[in-house]
């Protein structure tokens, strides 16, 4: 994964595969530390699988025998001096927390966060995606449920809505940067 | 936590959409819309699936094509990522492989708009993604 925004899509995909109906993505910036947590209410994993999950040969899928999502995330976090922490309970859900030191020379760029997050929202109509961004006192929050409420039955996956949500998030990121 | 401000604008857009097309009725029958599913697992993302999905959204919006564009997991065709599944109304789903933005444009112009088959179909797509 060449940037953080790609990791978000990738890790959230695990939640979707775990039949989650709600996925929460939180990005918390504090000075040079970025904490990214992705929490879901999916099927969860037992303690044994959580232990093995950073092994590239641990995967629950049957279509191929490797799973690189978590190993890549761990590699990119650890090479900045950060870490990845996974908490999971079968039947309850999973939380993947990763910490990056953003001023480290080996930290991958943030990438197009607005684009990843908007695709997550509009690409998964059956799941409530909740997004929270916190940066030095500034913050914003948006969720699929809120957007759906406004849409009154217009499909959230319509291209026009997709483009709108992406631009909306871009604006929000811009205003939080300033 | 502050809420996003632009949801008001979304309301405006919704009314525009509702007025132009009969989306509300259509949304109860999603099979009457073009359905595009983009495979968005590690393999797809690493191969550029996000750019493909963004492109499909932008291009279909520009051309006013009523569709739903959603994500799906790994379809098992990691060698051919990015892959997308396109279902035209009343047709069986087709899976296309190696869909970069150029291929995506060809699929929109020829298959989605005119129903012509284009190169790059992954043939054993008789099984829908959901059934896998």
Image: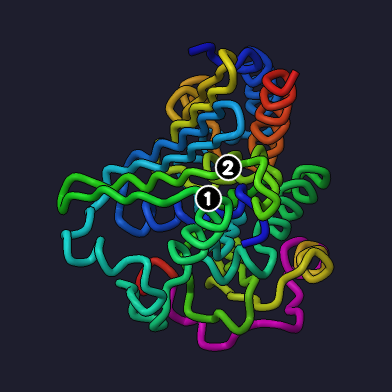
Marker disc for residue A81 = 1
In terms of secondary structure, what is the magenta stretch mainly?
A: loop
Q: Nearer the viewer, residue A130 or A99?
A: A99
Q: Is label 2 in contact with label 1 (beta carbons under 8 Å)?
A: yes
| Residue A77 at x, y percent in the picture | 52, 53
| Residue A144 at x, y percent in the picture | 47, 31
Q: Is residue B7 above or below residue A45?
A: above
Marker disc for residue A36 = none
Q: Residue at x 40, y 44 (%)?
A: A97
Secondary structure type for disc 1 = loop
Q: Residue at x 38, y 53 (%)?
A: A16
Q: Is residue B113 above or below residue B103?
A: above
Range shown magenta: B109-128
Left or right: residue A15 compared with residue A161 = left
Left or right: residue B44 compared with residue A178 = left
Q: Residue at x 48, y 74 (%)?
A: B75
Q: Nearer the viewer, residue B40 or A39?
A: A39
Q: Which residue is mark 2?
A: A101
Which chain hosts label 2?
A: A
Q: Nearer the viewer, residue A161 or A55?
A: A55
Left or right: residue A25 compared with residue B52 = left
Q: Are marks 2 and 1 on the same chain?
A: yes
Q: Residue at x 42, y 79 (%)?
A: A66
């Amino acid at each position: 994964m060449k940037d953080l925004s790609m990791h978000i899509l990738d890790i959230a995909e695990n939640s979707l595969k775990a039949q989650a109906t709600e996925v929460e993505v939180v990005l918390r910036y504090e000075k040079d530390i970025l904490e990214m947590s992705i929490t879901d209410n999916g099927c969860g994993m037992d303690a044994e699988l959580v232990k093995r999950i950073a092994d590239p040969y641990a995967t629950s899928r049957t279509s191929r025998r490797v799973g690189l999502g978590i190993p890549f995330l761990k590699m990119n976090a650890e090479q900045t001096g950060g870490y990845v922490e996974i908490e999971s309970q079968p039947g309850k859900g999973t939380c993947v927390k990763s910490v990056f030191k953003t001023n480290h020379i080996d930290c991958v760029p943030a990438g197009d966060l607005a684009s990843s997050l908007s695709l997550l929202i509009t690409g998964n109509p059956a799941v409530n995606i909740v997004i929270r961004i916190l940066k030095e006192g500034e913050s914003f929050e948006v969720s699929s449920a809120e957007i759906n409420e406004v849409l009154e039955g217009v499909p959230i996956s319509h291209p026009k809505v997709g483009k709108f949500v992406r631009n909306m998030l871009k604006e929000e990121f811009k205003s939080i940067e300033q | 936590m502050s809420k996003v401000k632009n949801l008001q604008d979304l309301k405006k857009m919704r009314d525009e959409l509702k007025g132009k097309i009969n989306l509300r009725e259509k949304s109860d029958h999603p099979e009457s819309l073009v359905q595009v599913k983009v495979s968005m697992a590690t393999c797809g993302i690493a191969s550029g699936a996000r750019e493909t999905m963004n492109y499909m959204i932008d291009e279909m919006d520009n051309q006013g094509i009523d569709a739903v564009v959603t994500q799906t997991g790994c379809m098992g065709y990691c060698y051919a990522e990015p892959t997308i599944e396109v279902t035209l109304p009343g047709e069986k789903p087709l899976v296309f492989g190696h869909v970069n933005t150029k291929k995506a444009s060809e699929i929109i112009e020829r298959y989605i708009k005119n129903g012509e088959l284009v190169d790059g179909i992954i043939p054993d797509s008789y099984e829908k993604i959901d059934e896998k």
